């Protein structure tokens, strides 16, 4: 009956893997499944723990690095959250200086400041160089 506990642990680890996508919990889920199979065939608890430990270490040292490289190669380098906004062109809606201003970015109005002391007038185009909290730092020059 203890094999059900191992399979439950494996299921929980698989759910954690889906959330984290780090391939760490996947290796532990496979190891828990292997220990559960050992339990199903009547192995003693210490053998089950040994199987879990050995399979975990082997998979963490072999499968995980290989799978991570494969995953990183197959998944495009997509910028997420604020990183996707860096370098984007913005329209100045209210004059922007080094302390205050408003710009239109990605369909929304943002509080903005300039990177230097230059004042950007209404209608000018600027570029996002940094985001500090809910404030966009802009410059008249597009970042590299």
Image (cartoon, rainbow, N blue to C red):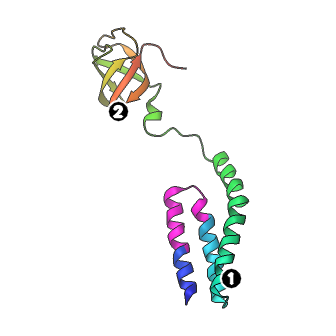
What residue would you read off at disc 1? 47
Depth check: 112 or 4 in front?
4
* Residue at (69% x, 51% y) in the render: 70
| Residue of label 2 | 133
| Left or right position of 143 against 36 | left
Residue found 72% across the figure and 65% down from its top: 58
Mark 2 vs mark 1, CA separation in Å: 52 Å
In the picture shown, does residue 75 fall above or below 57?
above
Density class for disc 1 (Cα within 10 Å; few <14, some 14-19, many ≥20) is some
The picture quadrant where one finds residue 21 is bottom right
Local crowd size for mark 2, using a 10 Å CA cut-off: few (<14), some (14–19), many (≥20) = few
Q: Is residue 72 left or right of residue 79?
A: right
Q: Residue at x 65, y 74 (%)?
A: 52
> Per the image, is 21 magenta?
yes
Q: Which mark is residue 90?
A: none
- Please identify the quadrant where the N terminus is shown: bottom right
106 or 27, which lies in front? 27
Q: Quadrant of the C terminus?
A: top right
Circles 2 and 1: CB atoms closer than 8 Å? no
> Element type at marker 2?
loop
Q: Is residue 66 above or below residue 143?
A: below
Q: Is residue 38 magenta?
A: no
Q: Relative to the observer, which residue lies in front, 23 or 54?
A: 54
Give how far across and how far down residue 75 sits, in percent.
Answer: 61, 47
Give the SS element for disc 1. helix
Residue range of the region highlighted in magenta in the rendering:
10-26
Of badges 2 and 1, the one in the foreground is: 1
In the displayed structure, 141 sits above or below 79; it is above
Location of residue 8 in the rendering, given as x and y in whole percent from the top left corner: 51, 78
């Amino acid at each position: 009956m203890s094999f059900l506990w191992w399979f439950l642990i494996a299921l929980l680890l698989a759910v954690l893997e889906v959330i984290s996508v780090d391939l760490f919990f996947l290796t532990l889920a496979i190891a828990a499944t292997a220990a559960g199979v050992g339990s199903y065939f009547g192995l003693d608890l210490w053998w089950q723990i040994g199987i879990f430990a050995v399979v975990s270490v082997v998979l963490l040292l072999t499968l995980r690095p290989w799978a991570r490289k494969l995953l990183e190669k197959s998944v495009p380098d997509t910028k997420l959250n604020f990183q996707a906004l860096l370098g984007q062109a913005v329209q100045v809606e209210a004059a922007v200086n080094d302390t205050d201003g408003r710009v239109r970015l990605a369909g929304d109005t943002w509080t903005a400041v300039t990177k230097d002391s230059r004042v950007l007038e209404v209608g000018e185009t600027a570029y996002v160089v940094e985001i500090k909290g809910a404030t966009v730092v802009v410059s008249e020059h597009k970042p590299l």
